Amino acid sequence: MNNSNFQTLGEFIIDKQEDFSLSTGEFTRLLSAIRLAAKLVNKEVNKAGIANIIGAMGSENIQGENQQKLDVLANDIFINALTQRDVVCGIASEENDDFIIINNKKQDHQSKYVVLMDPLDGSSNIDVNVSVGTIFSIYKRISPVGSPVILEDFLQPGTEQVAAGYIIYGSSTMLVYTTGNGVNGFTLDPEIGTFYLSHPNMKIPEKGSIYSINEGNSKSFSPGITAYLEHCKSSENKKPYSARYIGSLVSDFHRNMIKGGIYMYPATESSPKGKLRLLYECNPIAFLCEQSGGIATDGTNRIMEIIPSELHQRVPVFCGCSGMVKDVMQLMEIHDNA
Ligand code: AHM
Ligand code: MG
């Protein structure tokens, strides 16, 4: 294959920068830092299996350190890539209790962007060789430039996102992102370490026939959700929908976006507010979902309009094809509000 015919992610980012006449290049450099961190995490994820074998044999790495857990390593890689380039003034991560104030080489807190991320979502899947992902979300700070970031810079509703995306470390590695003008997907050529535009202007089908939910929790589902699951399996549809649940949000959402489907994580007995995090998982996925033509809701509210009250807030989530999400919302309206 002659890859030189295809647009690279780097070229795409620069082309888009030219759309903003007042652009300072800071956002372009921020996306470039994420692209670099994605490649570094990809390298680590790909060697996870062999590292385990070496680890199991009692070996240490070259510095004599024990193997670091991959989600912690991914967190460090993203934080380092972002802090070393003066492209963000703060980071909040699913891996850290509190947000991080950044004021590195460029003094006086001059950067205007904050990044919120789940550096390695679904990391329990690593040991069984199943795809995992990084999810990120970018906002402009609301506190004045020149001062340290504050909690309110991170507690903005998803509608304020400047960009959001994910990296899926799968049978191939892809970076998928939006800046509010549609969704574009880039596939990594691992031989030369370059992401190429492979999925321009991604659109989720209006209707689909795949449903993704941890049905093991079904005893604690509301009557509306139970009715929707019956609908998924019923012969009212041309044929029953297919159940597909990887247990790795990025992989389940990515598949549903391409093939058409719905992802659901409702409130359960053990997670009464839902399991997934509003800021690190639901908002960025909701932005991508809407930008590709889908819907993302907590059952009643648009995910991106929820006003966050804490960094690690959890919410129920239903996202995917608009037709499917409308169906489950309608059944919840009928059965759960009675
Ligand atoms: P994590 O952030 O601890 O990895 O948890 C998030 C993951 C999602 O990727 C996935 O969809 C969900 O948790 C699976 O949860 P469950 O095992 O309860 O079905
Ligand atoms: Mg997660």
Image (cartoon, rainbow, N blue to C red):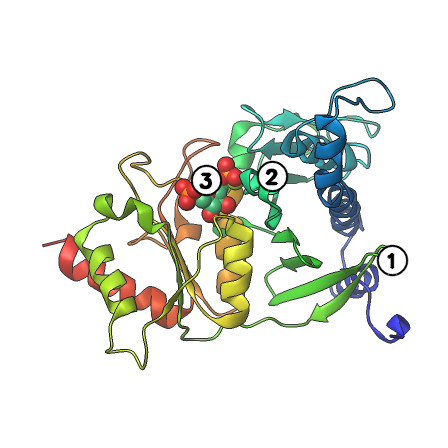
For marks 3 and 1, give the CA distance: 35 Å
Q: Mark 2 highlights which residue?
A: 127
What amino acid type should be assigned to the residue bearing mark 3? Arg
Location of residue 189 (image quadrant) = bottom right
| Residue at 59% from the left image edge and 33% from the top image edge | 93
Residue 310, located in which quarter of the rendered image?
top left
Q: Looking at the image, can residue 46 be seen?
A: yes
- Tell me how far mark 3 sits from mark 2, CA to CA: 23 Å
Where residue 11 sits: x, y (%)? 83, 63
Q: What residue is drawn where x is 44% and y is 51%?
A: 304
Residue 191: give its label: 1
Query: What residue do we see at 52% from left, 66% from top?
Result: 257
In x, y percent, where is residue 156? 49, 41
Q: Quadrant of the C terminus?
A: bottom left
Compared to residue 49, the image places residue 322 above or below, namely below
Q: Position of residue 229 (x, y in %)?
A: 27, 61
Q: Is residue 179 above or below residue 68?
A: below
Res 146 → quadrant: top right
Label 3 CB-ligand 2 distance < 8 A: yes
Q: Which mark is residue 277?
A: 3
Q: Secondary structure at mark 3?
A: loop
- Examine the rendering and report whether any part of residue 110 can be seen: no
Label 2: which secondary element: helix
Count residues near mark 2 (Cα–Cα under 10 Å), then give few for <14, some for 14-19, many for 20+.
few
Residue 233 or 160: which is nearer the viewer?
233
Q: Amino acid at mark 1?
A: Glu
